[in-house]
Amino acid sequence: MIRVSLQTWLARAAFAATVVTLTAPMLADAQTIVSPKAADAETQTAVADYNAGNFGPALAEFRKAAQHGSRLAEFNYAMMLLNGEGTAPNVEEGKKWLRKAADANMSHAQYVYGKMYDDGEFVGRDPAEAHTWFLKAAKQGHVQAELALANQFLDGRGTARDNQQAFFWYKKAAEGGDMTAQYVTGSFYERGGDGVDRNLNVARAYYAAAAAQGDPAARLKYQQLTSQLQQEHEAKPQ
């Protein structure tokens, strides 16, 4: 589903420069994209109004800043149109502004645009088109896009199946803190193959990282590998 309230992005704390959020750092980023200071001020005002639940004024302010070339405002305006916040849903206009933000190289817009095609939401399902946009965002370090890309390579969806590429992107997403990717990366190291050297210690470390984020399956794997490694250590001649 593409439907995501802007509140999700506004409330999310900034972590790593690769994840787009509607926080002060992104407002600063918008200022570097658009030379007129008005666009930044309009976007900040729009964010404040959105947070206060004043969707009508926020919509108008995002639209104005988007027309001034702010890619952040383009994305926010698109999401409000698609979700029908402050107005009746306008899918075609929303898709147009989302594409503008994606074409302006905003990684999160690229990810959302790709997900739209991957899910078949508002458009016909097209995994190959989704792959194109996931790749653009992943190359900028967008963690969710890295995970989506890895899943596509693993499944052979929208691209040829390639376990080595899948591992490459899972590991990238794992290093970016994604819990699912940490678990899958651990499983690659536990199993070995596909260009990955089997390494139970490294696998254990990735499972531990996922377990620390609350993954119960990763916690179980961590405990199993800990026990296995301890037994192997004790069985070695002293």
Image (cartoon, rainbow, N blue to C red):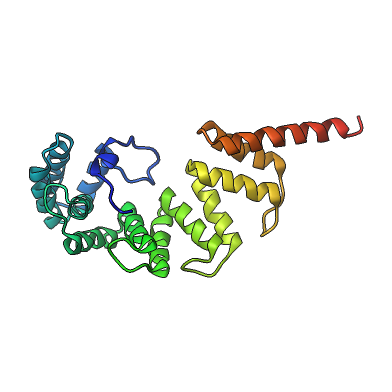
Total numbered circles: 0
Query: Quadrant of residue 154 in the image?
Result: bottom right
Q: Position of residue 230 (x, y in %)?
A: 78, 31
**Would you say residue 209 is visible in this rendering?**
no
Residue 196 point in image, percent of width and height: 67, 54
Look at the picture and state if 97 lies above or below 230. below
Nearest the eye: 121 or 176: 121
Q: In the displayed structure, would residue 210 be above or below residue 133?
A: above
Asked whether 146 or 225 is in front, the reply is: 225
Q: Which quarter of the figure has residue 52?
A: top left
Looking at the image, residue 208 sits to the left or right of residue 67; the answer is: right
Residue drawn 67% across the image and 59% down it: 195
55 to the left or right of 180: left
x, y percent for residue 179: 50, 41
Q: Is residue 54 left or right of residue 202?
A: left
Quadrant containing the C terminus is top right
Question: Which residue does the image show at 46% across and 53% down from the upper left?
Answer: 146
- View extreme (right): residue: 237
What residue appears at the point 87 percent right and 33 percent down from the top-left corner?
235
Image coords of residue 88 (percent x, y): 12, 54
Residue 143 visible, this orientation: yes
